[in-house]
Amino acid sequence: MQRFTNGSNLQNSFIYVPLLALNARKIILTAHRGFRHLLTDAQLGKTRMILLGQTLLACADIIGLGSMVPVLMLALDHSFLEKSSKLRFIFSQLGFTSEANFLKTLIGIILLFFLIKGLLAFFLQQFIRKTASEIAYSLSHRAYNHVFEARSYDRLNHDGPGFNEVVFFSPFYFVSGTYIPYLTLMSELAIVVLLTAFFTWYNPFIFFLIVGLIGGGFFLVNRFARKRITELGEAGAQYRDKALREINYGSGGFTDIITHGAEEHFRGKMLQHFRGFSESGIRAINLQTLPFRVNEMIALIGITLLVIYAYFYSSDNIGQVRALAALFAIAVFRLLPAANRVLQSLMHLKLSAYTLDQLRPVVAEPSSKKESICHFEQEISIRDVHFAFSDKPEIISALNLSIRKGESVGIRGVSGAGKTTLVKLLMGFYLPKSGKIYVDGKIVDDSKSTLELFAYLGQDPYIINGSIAVNVVFGTDASDTQKIQKALEMAAFIWPEATGDLLKAEVGDHGSHLSEGQKQRLALARAIYHNSEVLILDEPSSALDGATEQILLGHLAELKKSGKTLIIIAHREKVFDICDTVYTLENKRLNPYQP
């Protein structure tokens, strides 16, 4: 999202003409190639229909604008019918005897033409809106599926733009910053090309006048405003980020700020950055009036030059000046905005090009259906595994571990040693840089999923804003009340403050009505309810008092007797009493624990 901050003045983006003119072809081709990768065949088909419709409407625009010129001439110059052989031909062929009736009929036809064209443009715009919404929804859907099917959430957050970015923001910014601007660009380019060709054919003077005036106006705006607007955009982005950081400090550390009486300090820093942000934005808004003033001057200078040309150099002063003035007015009020929108669209495409790179790898369809490993009979083994995030130093090196079915394995180690990374390697969230992980001799790789084999209870369990029962069944449609109650009992979950039916009691947003220990036990009940063969417990008793911890250990011992395989990560030694084997993870490797 930060990438868009510097583009807060996109309505003035045409001031970057020299840069964009050099890169326009590259920008358009990049967007075009991105569409081929990101859009489905059906969406590409709809896009081609839209482009065809826009081209036809562009032609209709030219026809409509062109038809206005002779009508205006006929209305302003009563002798124009005699001067125009084409109008006389139409007049005679249609059997008119009155010039007034002929003019009324032409005006009526033109109005009807513009009405039909406007309705078609409206329906095309609705079609574009629906197609764009469908594309954004489809990209978000495909990205979400890919992240979960490829188990790449952590990889996205460590090595990529992040889950929220590619699933939520990038699909929208691709549509709003690339797809729609691309359609606008193609439509307005068609207008520019057709109008330019028409003016060149009708009167080369008009063409060179327009090119000279518009080009000169763009140069002036680019020369005097570009640097300042860019500086304001960059300054505004910096101030905004600093202000948001101070706001986050204020909200995230609300309790500490209140108890230490530091409100004035944090408020002052936030307001200081907010002042810089707002002043930069307001100055940029003031500069936004510059292009309109330039357009006004272009129109004034153009009309003045036309009058001078027609009076001093034209053999037919009155007729020529009317025709040229009408054409120039069409150019100013249709060609100039079209040129502006072309350059705005190019700037949008340039600023949003990053979304193509973000979405391309995460919307790819899986090459084949993964084989799901949901049970094992003998053992899970890790053989000489190495792992690191991106180009960072290794977290795990030459690690070996065997876990037999029904065994309870404890893993200890200091914070940051890589214990959680190890279990996520086991579950398949990460793939080793080298080495192998086996389940009953089958290699776990991109073609196999072990997610159904494991239930994971992390240190910060995810609690839904809903009832106890909803949190236990966690996304499954069917719920077994007796099974839920049994899971809660096995997890030693108690909530004395709850009133009424415990299963219907609401836990609040992120479990705000529960203690940290209750959250952990509720998440444990969820893991027990889903009945996976391997239960991974990451610090299961860290938030429990001694008595509750003893109850939990008793229930874990019962789970072990039932045949469950347990992997327990903990700091508190008492938890390891139920473990058959305990390892210490240190120096990137596992070693048998020696009390």
Image (cartoon, rainbow, N blue to C red):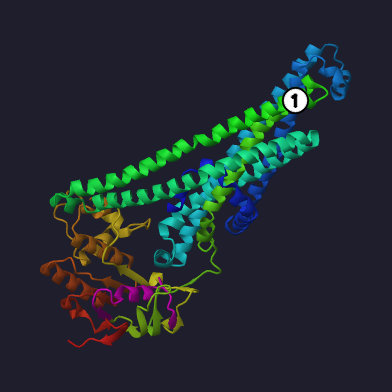
Q: Specify whether 358 is left or right of 183.
A: left
Few, some or many residues within 10 Å of mark 1 (<14, 14–19, 20+): some
State the residue at coordinates (53%, 66%).
366
State the residue at coordinates (42%, 78%).
432
State the residue at coordinates (79%, 13%).
101
Q: Specify whether 457 is left or right of 516.
A: right
Query: What element does badge 1 sit on?
Result: helix
The quarter of the displayed image where residue 560 is located: bottom left
90 is within the stretch colored magenta: no
Q: Toward the viewer: 293 or 254?
A: 293
Is 307 above or below relative to 570? above
Quadrant of the image containing the C terminus: bottom left
Residue 392: give x, y in percent of width and height: 39, 75
The quarter of the displayed image where residue 299 is located: top right
416 is within the stretch colored magenta: yes
User: Residue at label 1?
Assistant: 69
Residue 222: give x, y in percent of width and height: 56, 44
Q: Which amino acid does label 1 sit on?
A: Val
The quarter of the displayed image where residue 481 is located: bottom left
Identify the residue at the far left of this view. 547
Q: Toward the viewer: 224 or 96?
A: 224
Q: Toward the viewer: 66 or 512?
A: 66
Q: Toward the viewer: 418 or 564?
A: 418
Is 110 above or below relative to 194? above
Residue 104: give x, y in percent of width and height: 75, 15
Boundaries of the magenta span: 408-435
Is 431 above or below relative to 349? below
State the residue at coordinates (35%, 78%).
395
Residue 318 appears in the rendering = yes
Residue 465 appears in the rendering = no
Q: Specify whether 9 is left or right of 334.
A: left
Is 243 above or below relative to 304? below
